[in-house]
Each structure stands twice: as structure tokens, then as C-alpha cells.
Image (cartoon, rainbow, N blue to C red):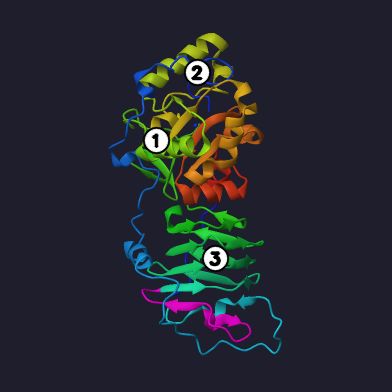
């Protein structure tokens, strides 16, 4: 993966890990599969980058889009046509001391507005031209309530809030400087997202705060101590909303347990075949506590109403189907409609909207 471009300006504004698959799970009754909560910080899918600013998060919660103190840039130029449907942003006027609207050409408008605490808000459709860019600096945030046609670049070092009614599309690129946790996505993003470079912390790899465990990136033997509270909560919510039982038949599995599981499948099918549906110890997502196998590890599960509901809705609860049918060559594992991975609601939606598997989204090898 190429080195990402640096910030040059600012804006105010798992896998058949177990015995899951076409065969019954040899580890289904293991104590490692019980629903328990992770207590250590290493279980979280999000880590805070040393360069991330906590002040931007607190400022967001203290501000609202209905702020009565709105300051409109004096450099907004009125269009000669009253039928202009969108605004165009140029990089030349975007700076930390001025509102984004200083670079907007539109009919007379009060957007984007500058709210207190360094939060800028865009409420009307805008177009970011090719070669142009918007930069959200470390201590600032941008709230989008409309559609953005992104044909240039949007750099997120601070905070980007994409409301439910908002959409970012176009041929441009949204660059994440530090963590995906810096994006709060309730809307839709179909533009390409450029992820940060992988970072290793205590032997564990993270990309934009997302914990990675796959064929290339392994976990330490002593990593993990149970199913994460966040994933457990998400599964309970899906059960309640869907009406399906959705039992977790394989949750957290320690390194030692995965050694037994993998050895079992190698003895049965040979190592080469086993590697297509079972993880080598240390590379199983189950060891993270952020992955679970739901209901059945049989291929026929994909045709059930439950599996179809899971595929269509799990992202709303912060999860993704980790090993899609059309991404086998990339993930290195067969299709697993039962295997979900917790990422958090915003990141899961970004991955879902992209149509990519996690390796593609994070721009890493599988």
C-alpha cells in the first residue's frame, strides 16, 4: 500500500475458523464459545491514535445544527441564476480562520454555517471539483446534512459527521488521516475511502482503529479474553428486532483452542484444504472477541430467511458479513454467511456502502 498523502492544509469547518462450514463445529461446546464480556481495552475494535484530538468529539456533543449564532462568510458570491442547484468548493480559500463558505459559489445562502466550538455545517448540496479539496483539521469538525458530489479530495483529520439525510458520492477520495472513529456516518458514502497505513501496537495490527486478524496479520498468543460486550449487545438487538433466535454457536476462541480446531481439520482434510475454511492459530478473528458464528455453519444456512435478514441488516447493528461469496479470492476463505464481525455502526455502514470486503476497504492483504 502506498504511503498516504500528508495533510497540507486545514478546514474550519473471521472464516471457517472453527469447524464451521459444510461440516459441524467440533468446538461448538467449548467453554470458549460462551457469551462473556471482554474487560481489557485490547478487545476494542477502536484504538485512539496518538494524534487524534479528543476536543473535537466533546465539541460536537455540545453543539447543535439549530444554533442561533450563525456567521456567514462575506466572501459568498451571489449567482446570477436563481436556478443553481449546488455549490462548488475550491481549495484556494479554505483555511482554519475562515468558514468553508468562503469558497462557495452559490445563490445567496447561509451555508455552510459556522457553529460554536469549531464545527462547520453544510446544509445544501455541494460539488467539490476535480483537483479541489476540503480539509478538516485536527480540532475542527464538519457536519454534512446534504449531498456532496466529491470529485476532488476530502481529508479528515478532525471530525466528519454525515447525517442520515446526507450522501457523499462522486469520483473523488475521502482520506482518513487517523481513525475511522473520526467519522460518524449515519448517511451514505459511495465515494472511495482512503484508509490510513497499518499500525502495530503490542503485536496487534490496527488500520484506522480497526483491529485486523487475517492470514497476513496475526495476533499474539495471549491476546483476547472473551466475547466483546459490544458484539454481544449487537447480537441481542438483532434477535429482538428480527424475531430470529440467532444463537452464537462459536464466539471467542483462544489461541490454544484454535490450535486444536485447526489440527482437527488438517487431520480430516489435509492442511491445504483446511486453510480455506479454518484459520491458522493466531490468525482467527474469533480470538479478537469481535467475531461470532451465528446459528449454523452449514452451507444451506445461506438460503434461510434468517441468513438473508442478517446479510441485509447486520450493518445497522455495527456488524458485517466478514467473508462474502464474491470475495473468496481476496479473503482467502470460503463464503461464510454465518460469520459476523463487529466494527461499530458507523464503520460497518461505510464498509457496507462500499460493497467491499474488509481487506479491500482497509487496503490490506488477505
Towards the viewer: 216 or 29:
29
Would residue 65 appear left or right of 153 to someone viewing this image? left
Earlier along the polypeptide chain: callout 1 or callout 3? 3
Q: Which residues are magenta?
A: 101-118
Of circles 1 and 3, the one toward us is 1
Q: Secondary structure at mark 2?
A: loop
Which disc, if any, is residue 232? Answer: 1
Towards the viewer: 198 or 139:
139
Tell whether position 108 is magenta. yes
Q: Secondary structure at mark 3?
A: strand
Which residue bears the numbered disc 2? Answer: 19
Q: Residue furthest top?
A: 267
Would residue 261 appear left or right of 365 to someone viewing this image? left
Q: CA distance from mark 2 to mark 3?
A: 43 Å
Specify the quadrant of the image occupied by residue 174. bottom right
Q: CA distance from mark 2 to mark 1?
A: 21 Å
Above or below, comparing residue 259 to residue 7 in the picture: above
Of circles 2 and 3, the one toward us is 2
Q: Residue at x 71, y 87 (%)?
A: 81
Q: Residue at x 39, y 35 (%)?
A: 232
Amino acid at each position: 500500500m502506498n504511503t498516504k498523502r500528508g495533510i497540507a492544509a486545514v478546514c474550519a469547518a473471521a472464516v471457517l475458523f472453527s469447524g464451521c462450514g459444510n461440516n459441524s463445529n467440533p468446538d461448538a461446546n467449548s467453554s470458549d464459545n460462551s457469551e462473556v464480556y471482554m474487560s481489557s481495552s485490547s478487545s476494542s475494535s477502536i484504538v485512539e491514535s496518538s494524534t487524534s484530538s479528543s476536543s473535537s468529539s466533546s465539541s460536537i456533543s455540545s453543539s447543535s445544527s439549530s444554533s442561533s449564532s450563525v456567521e456567514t462568510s462575506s466572501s459568498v458570491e451571489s449567482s446570477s441564476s436563481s436556478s443553481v442547484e449546488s455549490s462548488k468548493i475550491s481549495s484556494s480559500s479554505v483555511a482554519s480562520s475562515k468558514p468553508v463558505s468562503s469558497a462557495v459559489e452559490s445563490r445567496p445562502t447561509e451555508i455552510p454555517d459556522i457553529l460554536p466550538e469549531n464545527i462547520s455545517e453544510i446544509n445544501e448540496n455541494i460539488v467539490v471539483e476535480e483537483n479541489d479539496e476540503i480539509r478538516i483539521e485536527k480540532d475542527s469538525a464538519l457536519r454534512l446534512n446534504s449531498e456532496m458530489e466529491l470529485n476532488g479530495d476530502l481529508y479528515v483529520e478532525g471530525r466528519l459527521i454525515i447525517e442520515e439525510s446526507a450522501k457523499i458520492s462522486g469520483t473523488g477520495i475521502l482520506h482518513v488521516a487517523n481513525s475511522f472513529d473520526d467519522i460518524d456516518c449515519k448517511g451514505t458514502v459511495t465515494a472511495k475511502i482512503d484508509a490510513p497505513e497499518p499500525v502495530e501496537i503490542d503485536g496487534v495490527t490496527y488500520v484506522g482503529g480497526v483491529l485486523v486478524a487475517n492470514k497476513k496479520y496475526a495476533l499474539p498468543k495471549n491476546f483476547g479474553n472473551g466475547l466483546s460486550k459490544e458484539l454481544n449487545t449487537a447480537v441481542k438487538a438483532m434477535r429482538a428486532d428480527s424475531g430470529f433466535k440467532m444463537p452464537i454457536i462459536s464466539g471467542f476462541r483462544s489461541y490454544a483452542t484454535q490450535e486444536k480446531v485447526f489440527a482437527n481439520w488438517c487431520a480430516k482434510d489435509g492442511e491445504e484444504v483446511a486453510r480455506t475454511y479454518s484459520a491458522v492459530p493466531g490468525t482467527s478473528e474469533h480470538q479478537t472477541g469481535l467475531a461470532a458464528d451465528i446459528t449454523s455453519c452449514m452451507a444451506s444456512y445461506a438460503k434461510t430467511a434468517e441468513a438473508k435478514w442478517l446479510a441485509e441488516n447486520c450493518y445497522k447493528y455495527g456488524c458485517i458479513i466478514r467473508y462474502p461469496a464474491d470475495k473468496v479470492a481476496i479473503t482467502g476463505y470460503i463464503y461464510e454467511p454465518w460469520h459476523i464481525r463487529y466494527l461499530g455502526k458507523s464503520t460497518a455502514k461505510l464498509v457496507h456502502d462500499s460493497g467491499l470486503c474488509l481487506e479491500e476497504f482497509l487496503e490490506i492483504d488477505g
